[in-house]
Amino acid sequence: MAINHEKEVSAPLASEEAEEPGVFVRFREYMRRNPLLNTTWRIGVFTVGVTVLAGGLVMMVAPGPGILGIVVGLAILATEFAWAKRALHHAKQAAEKAKEKALDPRKKRRNTILAIVGGVLAGAAVIAYLVVYDFTLPWQIRDYTPWK
């Protein structure tokens, strides 16, 4: 007597049907099969990713969302390169640590107190400057002659 070890597979329900790969997945598989197209695609991804990453680095010192640019650049590069995937993983871990540190109630309270004290000191310095140099409101100027 033979034993059938194969399990009977019931027909999948409508919600469990195996979906066909999406258009992008099929397109990317087609590109990977052709070495020239694959290399061209990887060069394009590298160029766009490095450009966005460099823009993020510039925005770290210039106005703009620098960290967002760096993360987006790494995410673009991580679609094709393992080193970028590792760097993105490390960046995500560092961001998670920073979030936990920023949400620590004791440090949050300390930072709030420091911000208030700093604001009061800055306001006092401005008022002291205006008192020392005889600040006059524009509508109280009697004779406005910028040159004499």
Image (cartoon, rainbow, N blue to C red):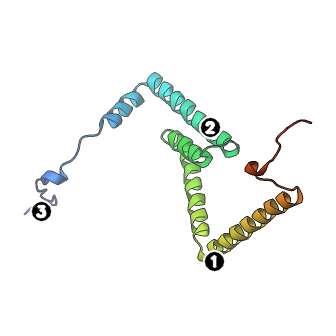
- The x, y position of residue 51, in whole percent, is 59, 33
Seen at 57% across and 68% down, the residue is 100
Instruction: Count neighbours of disc 2 (C-alpha within 10 A) and say few if under 14, some if 14 to 19, many if 20 or more.
Output: many
- The x, y position of residue 89, in whole percent, is 55, 53
Q: Which mark is residue 121?
A: none
Q: Nearer the viewer, residue 107 or 113?
A: 113
- The local secondary structure at tag 1 comes to helix
Give the residue furthest to the bottom.
Answer: 106
Seen at 80% across and 53% down, the residue is 136
- The x, y position of residue 76, in whole percent, is 51, 40
Type of amino acid at the residue the image marks with label 3: Ile
* Count of numbered badges drawn on the protein: 3
Q: On the picture, is 57 further left or further right than 43? A: right
Task: Look at discs 3 and 2 and give the one toward the viewer.
Answer: 2
Q: Quadrant of residue 49?
A: top right
Q: On the picture, is 102 further left or further right than 132? A: left
Instruction: Count neighbours of disc 3 (C-alpha within 10 A) and say few if under 14, some if 14 to 19, many if 20 or more.
Output: few
Upstream in sequence: badge 2 or badge 1: 2
Seen at 60% across and 67% down, the residue is 102
Q: Which mark is residue 106?
A: 1
Type of amino acid at the residue the image marks with label 1: Arg
- The local secondary structure at tag 2 comes to helix
Task: Look at discs 2 and 1 and give the one toward the viewer.
Answer: 1
How far apart are labels 2 and 1 at the CA level? 35 Å
Upstream in sequence: badge 3 or badge 2: 3
Q: Quadrant of residue 48?
A: top right
Image quarter hosting the C terminus: top right
Type of amino acid at the residue the image marks with label 2: Gly
